[in-house]
Image (cartoon, rainbow, N blue to C red):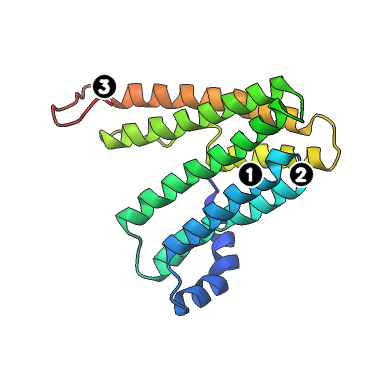
Amino acid sequence: MLGSGARAAVGRFWAPVVARLARAGVTPDAITVTGTVGAIAASVVLIAHGVLFWGAFTVTIFVLLDMLDGALARARGGGSAFGAVLDSTCDRAVDAAVFGALIWWYTGAGGDRLLALLALVGLVLGVLTSYIKARAEGVGIPCDVGLVERTERLILVLTGTGLTGLGLPYAVDVGLWLLVVGGAVTVAQRVVAVRRGARGTSLTPSAPAS
């Protein structure tokens, strides 16, 4: 999702930290779990109670740890299949916590059912976006297209939430609307990509349909 230049810049920024963590024996899985627990805690304790700026800021800090686990895995000689599954699972848990916290706030003291609905739709579209890719790749069809992937979803929702916490009117409204529209486009893009990639192929009896 980041361009190759941006990835290289991020890699150079984190390189000294990664080197120290590797020497200290810290594992990529530990980084993944730490970031996940921190992001979920910030969502539940802060965002769900209307502390929107500091909630978004804290979640962002912990989400940035997600950039470390892959780099640390490479520094230690490569990741594991379990690590890859753990990372993906933790990503879904963080997404659910962030959007769930917004839903909780806006159906309660936040008092805006439309924003709660947008957050719910954004969460569902994010799940569908990830599921389509995972299911497609599970049957051997590449599916890397998408206008709004996880990084973009988090940028939109956390930026909008944080700016709303600073008092900027309609910031979270704009972020959630962009996310919902972009998420719907992304789901459609992936369905079309899978449809094209599936031409001339069929499932074997050993590949379950769901």
Q: Position of residue 119 (x, y in %)?
A: 63, 28
Circle 3: is it few (<14), some (14-19), or many (20+) Cα within 10 Å?
Answer: few
Viewer-nearest of discs 3 and 2: 2
Residue 174, can we see it? no
> 182 above or below 2?
above
**Residue density around tag 2, few if under 14, some if 14–19, many if 20 or more, within 10 Å:** some
> Which residue is labeled 2 in the image?
51
What kind of element bears circle 2? Answer: loop
Badge 3 element: loop
Of mark 1 and mark 3, the one earlier in the sequence is 1
Estimate how packed mark 1 is, as few (under 14), some (14 to 19) or many (20 or more) residues with alpha carbons within 10 Å. some
Residue name at image x 54 percent, y 22 percent: 184
Percent from the top left, x then y, of residue 8?
A: 54, 60
Residue at numbered disc 1: 44
Q: x%, y% of residue 165?
A: 80, 41
Residue type at numbered disc 2:
Val
For marks 3 and 2, the one nearer the N-term is 2
Q: Identify the residue position indicated by label 3 in the image.
A: 199
Marks 1 and 2, Cα distance to the nearest angstrom?
A: 10 Å
Q: Nearer the viewer, residue 103 or 174?
A: 103
Horizontal and vertical percent position of residue 59: 64, 50
Residue type at the position of mark 3: Arg
